[in-house]
Image (cartoon, rainbow, N blue to C red):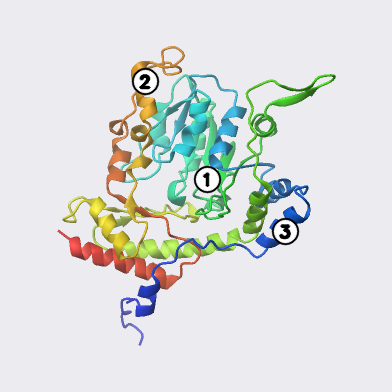
């Protein structure tokens, strides 16, 4: 009857018994076995990695793609290709994972972590600006939980200071910012195809760019071990190089997944927005805000914050109850706060180890939770889960919201 309010969703006994879908067993595209068979039947002579690189670059609308064993080596390859010196600084999102910064540490570059605005998971041009200095060379943006950093102001700030801009797109593959795809918003970007990710394979990653010199240098140092042939002698290595090449069987699965990822992302976008809308109706629960500039929300990790004082339990207990009630991977993730998690940096700065000694560093650095108080406070009440996938349907979104609602009502102060 028109005007009659809809009844609240109540999960059926069958749905409660089945629970929320998990990414595993992983959805594999129909051609995965066909492409794997090509690798086997060719006796490992087919160039499946090259085929994937070409297809991914075309799908993203960029000129170059370098396929790697994962996003961590892709990011390391990116910084191998940059003409940065030990002690140079790279601005990095403070809420991320170790893989984002491993390449910086390997190249003796110094990560600098701006704070986030209050209540936000990503940094902004406003929080980045005070952290820029004479040794700053680049800004590395992480689109955490599929929420884009606001890239236009960041790019404008970078242009003013002659800085490069890079994207860590591990959690935003084929998401769109103002009608532009993740990975096309800066000088270069890196992706992950680990099994739990949106375009999950058995592993894998890649770096993309439109810069021919950056591509050539990354290919040379990160995949070809910085080796060249010398007549009458053989191979010589002009730099420290690596063999970060995506395995052929991984490339076969990635190529198949690529053929269907856009439809999976479109479905995830709808289900994620529905889930967050339902969660936003629960007093004391604030899902990660989806800014208006996010046209397509591509995510594999979901999350929300608890209002301080709204519940008579610590966030860790709230998360554990959710996990027992059916959101199996619900937990806190305070270790995402890199200034606090990177104890190695705290030790190096305290001991004045290279490159944190002055010189080559231009100043003394401090790494702690207190250096990014907004990001610290955000993560203290942030509960995430990583079971979100393309298998979710509206009834699963409603079930997840019901579980959070009942937990919230149980603990409400």
Residue depicted at x 47% and y 55%: 299
* 239, above or below 392, in the image: above
Question: How busy is the neighbourhood of tag 3: few (under 14 within 10 Å), some, or many (20 plus)?
Answer: some
Residue depicted at x 28% and y 32%: 370
Q: Is residue 365 visible?
A: no
Q: What is the distance, in whole Å, between disc 1 and disc 3 at their CAs?
A: 30 Å
**Seen in the image, is 10 located left or right of residue 77?**
left
Question: How busy is the neighbourhood of tag 1: few (under 14 within 10 Å), some, or many (20 plus)?
Answer: many
Residue 16 position within the rendered picture, expressed as x and y whole percent measured from the top left = 35, 74
Q: Quadrant of the C terminus?
A: bottom left
In the depicted view, which residue is nearer to us: 2 or 80?
A: 80
**SS state under label 1:** loop
Name the N-terminal-most of marks 1 and 3: 3
Q: What is the distance, in whole Å, between disc 3 and disc 2 at their CAs?
A: 51 Å
Q: Residue furthest right?
A: 232
The residue labelled by disc 1 is: 169
In the rendered structure, find residue 349 and report the number of the disc placed on it: 2
**SS state under label 3:** helix
Residue depicted at x 69% and y 46%: 53
Q: What is the distance, in whole Å, between disc 2 and disc 1 at their CAs?
A: 29 Å
Name the N-terminal-most of marks 3 and 2: 3
In the depicted view, which residue is nearer to us: 232 or 228?
A: 232
In the depicted view, which residue is nearer to us: 203 or 298?
A: 203
**SS state under label 2:** helix
In the rendered structure, find residue 37 and report the number of the disc placed on it: 3
């Amino acid at each position: 009857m028109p005007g009659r309010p809809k009844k609240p969703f109540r999960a059926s006994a069958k749905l409660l018994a089945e629970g929320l879908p998990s990414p595993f067993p992983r959805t594999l595209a129909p051609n995965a076995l066909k492409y794997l068979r090509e690798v086997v039947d060719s006796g490992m002579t087919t160039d499946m990695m090259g085929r994937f690189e070409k297809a991914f670059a075309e799908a993203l609308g960029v000129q170059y793609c370098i396929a790697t064993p994962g996003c961590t080596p892709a990011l390391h390859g990116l910084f191998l290709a940059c003409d940065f010196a030990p002690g140079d600084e790279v601005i990095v999102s403070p809420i991320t994972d170790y893989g984002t910064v491993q390449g910086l540490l390997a190249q003796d570059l110094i990560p600098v972590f701006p704070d986030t605005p209050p209540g936000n998971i990503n940094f902004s041009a406003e929080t980045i600006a005070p952290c820029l200095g004479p040794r700053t060379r680049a800004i590395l943006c992480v689109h955490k939980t599929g929420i884009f950093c606001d890239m236009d102001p960041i790019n404008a700030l970078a242009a003013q200071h002659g800085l490069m801009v890079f994207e860590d797109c591990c959690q935003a593959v084929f998401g769109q910012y103002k009608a532009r795809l993740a990975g096309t918003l800066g000088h270069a970007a890196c992706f992950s195809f680990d099994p739990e990710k949106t375009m999950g394979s058995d592993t894998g990653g890649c770096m993309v760019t439109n810069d021919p010199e950056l591509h050539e240098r990354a290919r040379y140092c990160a995949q070809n071990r910085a080796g060249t042939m010398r007549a009458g002698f053989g191979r010589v290595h002009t730099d420290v190089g690596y063999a970060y090449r995506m395995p052929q069987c991984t490339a076969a699965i990635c190529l198949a997944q690529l053929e269907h990822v856009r439809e999976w992302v479109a479905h995830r976008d709808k289900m994620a927005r529905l889930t967050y809308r339902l969660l936003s109706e629960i007093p004391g629960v604030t899902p990660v805000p989806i800014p208006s500039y996010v046209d397509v929300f591509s995510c594999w990790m979901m999350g929300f914050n608890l209002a301080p004082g709204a519940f008579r339990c610590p966030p860790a207990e709230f998360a554990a109850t959710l996990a027992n009630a059916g959101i199996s991977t619900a937990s806190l993730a305070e270790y995402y706060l890199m200034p606090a998690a990177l104890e190695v940096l705290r030790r190096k700065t305290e001991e004045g180890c290279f490159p944190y000694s002055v010189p080559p560093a231009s100043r003394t650095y401090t790494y702690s939770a207190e250096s990014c108080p907004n990001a610290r406070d955000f993560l203290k009440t942030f509960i995430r889960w990583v079971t979100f996938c393309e298998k979710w349907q509206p009834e699963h979104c409603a079930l997840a919201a019901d579980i959070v609602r009942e937990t919230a009502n149980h603990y409400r102060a």
